[in-house]
Amino acid sequence: MTLVPLARLMVEPLVRAALLEDLGGAGDLTTDAIVPAGLAARTAMVAREAGVVAGLDLAKLAFALIDPNIAMQVEIDDGATVPTGGVIARVNGPAREILTAERTALNFLGHLSGIATATASIVAAVRGTKAKIVCTRKTTPGLRAVEKYAVRAGGGANHRFGLYDAILIKDNHIAIAGGIAEALRRARAAAGHLVKIEVEIDNLDQLAEALGEGADAVLLDNMSVETLAKAVAIVDGRATTEASGRVTPKSAPALAATGVDLISVGWLTHSAPVLDIGLDFED
Amino acid sequence: MTLVPLARLMVEPLVRAALLEDLGGAGDLTTDAIVPAGLAARTAMVAREAGVVAGLDLAKLAFALIDPNIAMQVEIDDGATVPTGGVIARVNGPAREILTAERTALNFLGHLSGIATATASIVAAVRGTKAKIVCTRKTTPGLRAVEKYAVRAGGGANHRFGLYDAILIKDNHIAIAGGIAEALRRARAAAGHLVKIEVEIDNLDQLAEALGEGADAVLLDNMSVETLAKAVAIVDGRATTEASGRVTPKSAPALAATGVDLISVGWLTHSAPVLDIGLDFED
Amino acid sequence: MTLVPLARLMVEPLVRAALLEDLGGAGDLTTDAIVPAGLAARTAMVAREAGVVAGLDLAKLAFALIDPNIAMQVEIDDGATVPTGGVIARVNGPAREILTAERTALNFLGHLSGIATATASIVAAVRGTKAKIVCTRKTTPGLRAVEKYAVRAGGGANHRFGLYDAILIKDNHIAIAGGIAEALRRARAAAGHLVKIEVEIDNLDQLAEALGEGADAVLLDNMSVETLAKAVAIVDGRATTEASGRVTPKSAPALAATGVDLISVGWLTHSAPVLDIGLDFED
Amino acid sequence: MTLVPLARLMVEPLVRAALLEDLGGAGDLTTDAIVPAGLAARTAMVAREAGVVAGLDLAKLAFALIDPNIAMQVEIDDGATVPTGGVIARVNGPAREILTAERTALNFLGHLSGIATATASIVAAVRGTKAKIVCTRKTTPGLRAVEKYAVRAGGGANHRFGLYDAILIKDNHIAIAGGIAEALRRARAAAGHLVKIEVEIDNLDQLAEALGEGADAVLLDNMSVETLAKAVAIVDGRATTEASGRVTPKSAPALAATGVDLISVGWLTHSAPVLDIGLDFED
Amino acid sequence: MTLVPLARLMVEPLVRAALLEDLGGAGDLTTDAIVPAGLAARTAMVAREAGVVAGLDLAKLAFALIDPNIAMQVEIDDGATVPTGGVIARVNGPAREILTAERTALNFLGHLSGIATATASIVAAVRGTKAKIVCTRKTTPGLRAVEKYAVRAGGGANHRFGLYDAILIKDNHIAIAGGIAEALRRARAAAGHLVKIEVEIDNLDQLAEALGEGADAVLLDNMSVETLAKAVAIVDGRATTEASGRVTPKSAPALAATGVDLISVGWLTHSAPVLDIGLDFED
Amino acid sequence: MTLVPLARLMVEPLVRAALLEDLGGAGDLTTDAIVPAGLAARTAMVAREAGVVAGLDLAKLAFALIDPNIAMQVEIDDGATVPTGGVIARVNGPAREILTAERTALNFLGHLSGIATATASIVAAVRGTKAKIVCTRKTTPGLRAVEKYAVRAGGGANHRFGLYDAILIKDNHIAIAGGIAEALRRARAAAGHLVKIEVEIDNLDQLAEALGEGADAVLLDNMSVETLAKAVAIVDGRATTEASGRVTPKSAPALAATGVDLISVGWLTHSAPVLDIGLDFED
């Protein structure tokens, strides 16, 4: 699998802000006091637990923005699995600057690898089915683009990126419009020709209505496995089917077995725990 | 308990960036297509699970930046506990603009309430002891100030905010300096008179050395409960004692029972799951 | 027709930058020297030629950012037609501040109304056909979102907003992939479920290939009216059809008569002349 | 002719914003899906019509900000004329990144070359007279500095850059002051010693008044050729004379023949059509 | 005397940055710990020494950005003299927020009032002569616009604001051009019609050359009073004359007595001491 | 002495803003008109008076941001003393770009070297005592971090950097709390374990109260030398002692002779005159 690297243009403001948040006006008081300028160090970013790596570009940028003389050599690429104790990358250069950038680099790498690892675990749970695992707009404010990248690194796919790139009609929209058919008609009339329309469905009556109006995709929300299976059968390929509702690695296989196209999991981006990664100095 | 509100000046750039991240250049395609301009709505932010609230200022700002005519009336303050189904705030105003701001407001509120709730659960676990629960610098990049606020809302306390406001001598610093005593001497020589110095301790020999050099605080890292108890006894009030190392609500009480002053928990800010909060339209 | 107002959040940085570009460090030397503080003025924004208005929110914001005491009363809304000499809005308040903001307000309003007017003229030329007029990504750098809004104000529709919200396979992509079918297969494999795919077609052979792979839309580029008509007939509703290639109000009706769904016009956003609007002081 | 290159410092924010406007959070969906990483390409920026080039620094920066490995070799400098089909520059490097930056690079280059070309056409129309062609403050919001550069590239000169670098007394200022003489006296009293003063003149009576007060320049607005000639004769070198009012290449020669020093043309920056430039892949 | 207020648009970023510089991520630890929320206070900004006030808009904005409920009532306007102990403004509102904004408000007000006071002292020293006191480009980085405003508040005038609004030919330019005449010719050829040209003169020979080429102004640098008087006599009104070179209130009168038009003083903006102003709480 | 270099990340926005403030939209009119492109120059930054150097990183960055081809070779490091006429650094490269960046580079270097020199003069005055010279929060808005760096370069030490990194209880806080003891109790209860607490003391009664509550440091404000000596004796090492109140090089020795630990001097950062440094072109 090849991952498209994140454009430096897009992530540099994030990394810069994170470093400045840690440096304040006084900088790294501890390191500046204790570590002599110019002292060279050889270090390794090591996984304290197994998982899928994501975010190396951001970690590399954190070091480079503090000092372009820090060389970071990647050993395990974004999207690949690191075992417990595995060396993800070697970071060599001036000890002082490495120590100053360390926490910011690790905060990005741990957070995004955590998302990739969580994604991979659900992806693995539905392997053999046609179901893709997708994320949602329930992301950490300011980090959506990189979190959606981490989901891809973990083998998942992305739902829409924001309010602006697709139409997703939810229950409140339907209530205001007075029904699914009317909501879909309004959406169709306003949508550009490259904008797809998905509609949230709570029951099988609504499903018929949505299919009748030609929805591109239906979000089958919080349905039992049985109802979901029925819904997928009714759709019969006329629209993309998406299941959602507090999905876990445990519940995912049964959902996937219904033949649903997509399973969306908000948990990937709003609640996945960090992957524990440390920086070890070598002798 | 009274929480000091977050300065609008500090959080406005975060909220603004999060909204723009969701709006892109085209705005809310769905809502603009379906919801008539000027339609009024009465809505409530409701907890889908019990927890401690944090981040209301950011949610309020998300609505206000989209439309100052949206009125958000807080029912349960930051730092207070909301039961499952409890109404945290009422949000009234134009339906279109409420729907557009909804996800950003909830993403902030859910993330920060998740941190507050996780903090409160560990704080509760050590109630009756003198131990305070503190967070670390393992925070989500860009969100440190508000995440540390959420820790306070959950009843915890804050460790240093960055590299710039205190000295924390870690293992790598000690190795480079050639020992704890030398590291502490260098730190003391460079530190301003209002800068405290803490040093990471791995064993009781190091502890004696640190106390001999007058460290203000000692970070007792990854010690067994027995060793920790011994260390606290040795310190005997001469320095602040802090225990750390993958602390959980389960392991915290035994640590706290040693009489340690502080227990630091990285998990609060890097891995706490979101508190599930939704926005319900009322009839 | 109701236009969704531009989110202040999205346009404020543009207006702020434009005002600062005009103010420099010294401000409005002329007005500050000549016009007494506090002098009140009643002025009107008057069209020197007929056209369609767009950009009132930006003009209003230009005045408000200089002085919130300037009141701008809109007489002719965005999307409506103003005759030569017609009053678009009345701007009352302190004379000094009105004069300082005048040029920035008019630059936005004239530029966007020029786009709306150009759009309306082509829309009128194809009235009675099913063809929609759409814009392209050939926009003025930094102003895409507001220019696309102006196109909507003129009765046109928007193509994709950027590289990020839809797939448009062009000749260079096809050449690199080794053919339309392979390019479409790669695109389909990578695309999210809400991402549509359009492909540029230069001849009828390519068209068959694209339809065979299920393209959502085909961009029929620089075809003669005859070929275009054949292409539309071949497609027969299986994909959205878009005609492009130096379209003018003169050439548009014949293109539209072929039954094509969309006619895209780069000229709307990259070359439409300004609508001449002035600010008149009233006695 | 040597053009002073635009300071990278000044234009980088514009180019960066334009690229991000096109990339959004998801990046270039099409290219990332279809074009293999690392594939090399040789391309040329080719003029589809003849004109004067301007903006190469911005195009180069667009490529460099996406990937510093893209090499852009200029063949025809800013300020020089390119024939139809002429190669302006060669752009070699990774195909994927070239394609991603292409539209932004071309949008800048086409827009600024359009302004330079329009300028050159009016400059040519008045060749042999002493009249210089100058631009106005009617520029595209946010792009004034680069548009004024493009005017210079086309052989024109710049009027003031903003409200801050010279005094230009217009009809509304005169009306508020109660006359040209009083307006000029107020301006003179406030102006720094390096600030010149120009005043807008509608008739020959006003002209006498302005000369009596020692205006540095007079803006002879919307006068007939006959009146303009009289005005220039009356001024007789005592002030710089500037003609304005919907000047076109057709009307310019007669204006220039009056001996006026400057002819200002708002059209250059607010309505010049783009110069059509494309990017061709070479085999 | 009426001072044009500083545009909020121009100074808000400066005030915002200064406040954030003081607040960091943790805010005002002292005040938040000690001062109860909602406690009201009545305070006064009091001059600890006599001087000329400048910068009230920035101080007011500092309070307003922290809390719009803080009311600042100005007693002594910018440009007016405050005696020792005089109340410049009253600041009433929530005690906590006033204390948090206090230092930033005073830092701006003290710095700018210091410049105004220094200016006023030299202006007073040359009263009765025609000499105006002007500032230079030797300003504090980032604060030029407001420092030049403070010079005006002190009764001085402004030299050019930057490299962009006038031509000032200095010794290095002359050396590179090979002489004053050639430098002036190059400058004249390139200058827009509203751009004045000043040239630095070290001796009387250069002066003749400059006048011969029609310089608008001559900067008579570091001349003795006698030479300066001769130079002014030679110029005899044909150009603006400016004296410079480590001018002090003591040396200024003799310079002014030569009849020179302007005396420029870098010290006003790069070395004027702060005016001591405090904030007193009232009972 | 080794000074920790300023992180480029922290100072680049300051240098960038200062350059843009000088360049405006039109750039360096004078140099662009007169100096040929590509002309090479060898120049030296020379001290016109003796002092301590500070700010070389910022000067270097000013040149580099205008043109990375400018090479700046430091001869006298930050923190070292330069004699009158001494060469601080050699700056070689394109003449045009050097001239354009010159003033910004010198404004930073002169301002910060002025602070370092002022600091060094007071540090020298108290040599032989244990007193350290420290700065305050009375800094130039926006420049605090670099000004505090300059104080260190001059041999001084830093007080707290802002409201966020230590607690300093002042008279108004004490009045609101109802006394020193209560203020200290509130501060202690809220302070993190790495936050020190200092309290302002006006008389010896207050001092006893502060020591009784265990203040980490006492700010002995505006005391006579006799009272100060008594206070220092009373404290007897139980807290850090700081003297303040319009300290000058003249008054400092007597204060230092009392045995006080710190002498804080606001004048260093709010009123130190610039160190006069020029840029000389060499033949």
Image (cartoon, coloured by chain):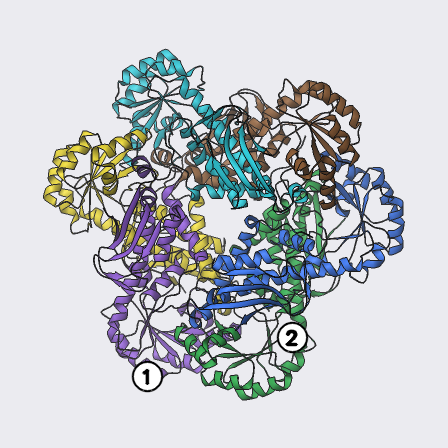
Chain colours: A purple, B yellow, C green, D blue, E brown, F cyan
The spot of residue C92 in percent (x, y) is 67, 49
Residue at mark 2 to residue at mark 1: CA–CA distance: 46 Å
Q: Between A77 and A103, which is closer to the camera in this rendering? A: A77
Q: Secondary structure at mark 2?
A: loop
Are there few (<14), some (14-19), or many (20+) residues within 10 Å of tag 1?
A: few
Q: Which mark is residue A233?
A: 1
Considering the image in quadrants, where does the C terminus of chain B appear?
Answer: bottom left
Q: Between C276 and E160, which is closer to the camera in this rendering? A: E160
Considering the image in quadrants, where does the N terminus of chain B appear?
Answer: top left
Q: Which residue is mark 2?
A: C247
In the image, B68: left or right of E82? left
Chain letter of disc 2 in the image: C
The spot of residue F27 in percent (x, y) is 62, 45
Are there few (<14), some (14-19), or many (20+) residues within 10 Å of tag 2?
A: some
The spot of residue E266 in percent (x, y) is 60, 28
The residue positioned farthest toward the front in the image shown: F283
In the image, C244: left or right of A214? right
- Is any atom of residue E8 visible in this view? no
Residue B229 lies, with reference to residue E127, above or below; the image says below
Q: Between F89 and D117, which is closer to the camera in this rendering? A: F89
Residue E85 lies, with reference to residue C150, above or below; the image says above
- Is any atom of residue E256 visible in this view? yes
Q: Between F102 and C238, which is closer to the camera in this rendering? A: F102
Quarter assignment of residue E2: top right
The spot of residue D141 in percent (x, y) is 62, 54
Q: Amino acid at mark 2?
A: Val
Label 2 vs label 1, nearer the camera? 2
Q: Secondary structure at mark 1?
A: helix
